[in-house]
């Protein structure tokens, strides 16, 4: 039997890299879509030592004809749509582009799969807890009503529903993973967890001063990215396509994440207010480590996310194996090493 062939959009991102690693391990041929217009950033694939094992395909979610040719050429068994404008904050600055890539891009990809006419192709859509936004219940599950709070969340909600629509209208084996935040040492430094751990490493190495943050009272359900890509694959293997929440069921504030990361870096943070900003000081050295800035707050915020992954646990036997404490330790250690390597 010939190897299963997977096509991953967003191969250069955190999830793309970990999913590719998992699928290679399972014997798949992995095709990774990358954008020619952006710098070809294979850093994460290189860190995992798999950059030479991926077939790279130039790909553009804004261009239907390109998507169609790609699917025809690769003839995948499974398509994982992980590509997106994934920065929630930036989506307020680029609402139309975000909609074009995240919402219509998903529609283009589903339509290309339909037009190619191979009904065996299975599809995974990276849906997100951002769709719950202003939450109507805690914890959030598959049946919780959606109320997105950013152009990113709105666009992802369109992508979620168009995926369900193709499943119902055309019988496409299309599943949505409603993933809560998931972190790792390969997380982009634009996201708050990695911003904190990489900045702490730089600060301790004398390369930067105080770390400025936005809303430190936002709460998130933070899991470990490698655990979550396993859940993606498990969804796609089900006889029937469906939608699943992947989450840890625990929620922590950004403030708590700061404290945990600082502690793992040998500090002890005490919070106070100065000139209407929160200041996080290291009790041991008296040094100011964190400071809030209104300029980093979002026009509309998602205050609290906490997921209920019971369905994934029951149907996929999936669990979030890795604790936040373990994730923080890994990220702090990896950033400390990275900074001293420079
Ligand atoms: N990025 C960032 N930078 N966020 C900050 C900062 C800061 O300086 N200060 C506070 N925050 C707060 C944000 O306002 C938000 O409430 C929280 O930290 C988490 O922000 P991010 O790490 O940027 O992630 P996100 O929750 O907005 O979105 C991530 O998770 C989603 C799943 O829930 C992204 O990975 C999305 O693509 C993903 O869909």
Image (cartoon, helix red, strand yellow):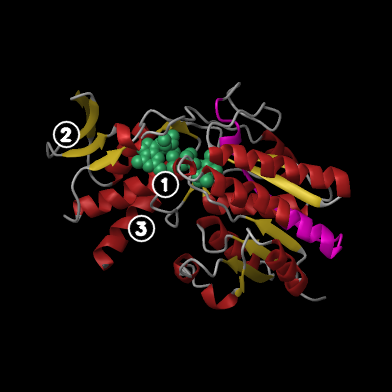
Viewer-proximal residue among 217 and 302: 302
Q: How many callouts does the rendering have?
A: 3
Q: Residue furthest front?
A: 96
Q: Name the residue under label 1.
A: 191
Disc 1 from disc 3: Cα separation: 16 Å
Q: Percent position (x, y) of residue 69? A: 73, 70
Secondary structure under the numbered disc 2 in the rendered image: loop
Which mark's residue is nearer the viewer, 1 or 3? 1
Q: Name the residue under label 2.
A: 283
Q: State left or right for residue 77 relative to residue 13.
A: right
Give the residue drawn at x 84%, y 51%. Answer: 239
* Mark earlier in primary sequence (1, 3): 1
Q: Residue 334 carries which label?
A: 3
Find out whether the residues at labels 1 and 2 contact each other: C-beta distance under 8 Å: no
* Mark earlier in primary sequence (1, 2): 1
Q: Residue furthest top?
A: 136
Image quadrant assignment for residue 298 = top left
* Mark 1 C-beta closer than 8 Å to ligand 1: yes
Viewer-proximal residue among 17 and 315: 17
Q: Residue furthest left?
A: 286
Q: State left or right for residue 141 relative to residue 256.
A: right
Secondary structure under the numbered disc 1 in the rendered image: loop
Give the residue drawn at x 47%, y 71%. Answer: 46
Q: Percent position (x, y) of residue 80? A: 67, 57
Compared with 259, 68 (above or below) is below
Q: Which quadrant of the rendered structure holds the N terminus?
A: bottom right
Image quadrant assignment for residue 66 = bottom right
Disc 2 from disc 3: Cα separation: 24 Å
The magenta region covers 109-134
Q: Which quadrant of the rendered structure holds the C terminus?
A: bottom left
Compared with 215, 211 (above or below) is below
Which mark's residue is nearer the viewer, 1 or 2? 1
């Amino acid at each position: 039997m010939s190897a299963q062939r997977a096509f991953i959009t967003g191969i250069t991102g955190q999830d793309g890299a970990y999913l590719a690693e998992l699928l290679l391990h399972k014997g798949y041929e992995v095709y990774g879509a990358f954008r020619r217009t952006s710098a070809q950033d294979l850093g994460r694939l290189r860190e995992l030592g798999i950059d030479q094992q991926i077939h790279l395909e130039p790909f553009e979610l804004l261009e239907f004809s390109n998507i169609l040719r790609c699917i025809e050429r690769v003839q995948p068994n499974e398509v994982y749509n992980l590509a997106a404008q994934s920065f929630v904050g930036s989506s307020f600055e680029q609402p139309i582009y975000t909609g074009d890539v995240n919402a219509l891009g998903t529609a283009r990809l589903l339509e290309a799969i339909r037009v190619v006419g191979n009904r065996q192709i299975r599809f995974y859509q990276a849906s997100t807890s951002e769709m719950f936004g202003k939450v109507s219940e805690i914890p959030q599950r598959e049946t919780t009503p959606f109320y997105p709070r950013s152009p990113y969340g709105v666009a992802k909600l369109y992508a979620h529903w168009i995926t369900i629509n193709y499943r119902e209208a055309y019988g496409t084996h299309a599943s949505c993973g409603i993933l809560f935040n998931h972190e790792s040492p390969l997380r982009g430094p634009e996201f708050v967890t990695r911003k904190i751990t990489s900045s702490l490493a730089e600060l301790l190495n004398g390369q930067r001063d105080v770390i400025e943050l936005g809303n430190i009272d936002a709460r998130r359900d933070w899991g470990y990215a490698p655990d979550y890509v396993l859940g993606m694959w498990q969804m796609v293997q089900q006889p029937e396509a469906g939608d699943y929440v992947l989450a840890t069921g625990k929620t922590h504030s950004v403030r708590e994440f700061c404290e945990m990361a600082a502690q793992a870096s040998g500090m002890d943070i005490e919070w106070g207010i100065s000139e209407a900003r929160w200041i996080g000081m290291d009790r041991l050295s008296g040094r100011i480590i964190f400071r809030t800035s209104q300029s980093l707050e979002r026009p509309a915020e998602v205050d609290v996310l906490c997921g209920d992954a019971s369905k994934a646990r029951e149907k996929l036997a999936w669990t979030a194996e890795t604790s936040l404490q373990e994730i923080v330790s890994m990220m702090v250690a990896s950033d400390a090493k990275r900074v001293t390597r420079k």
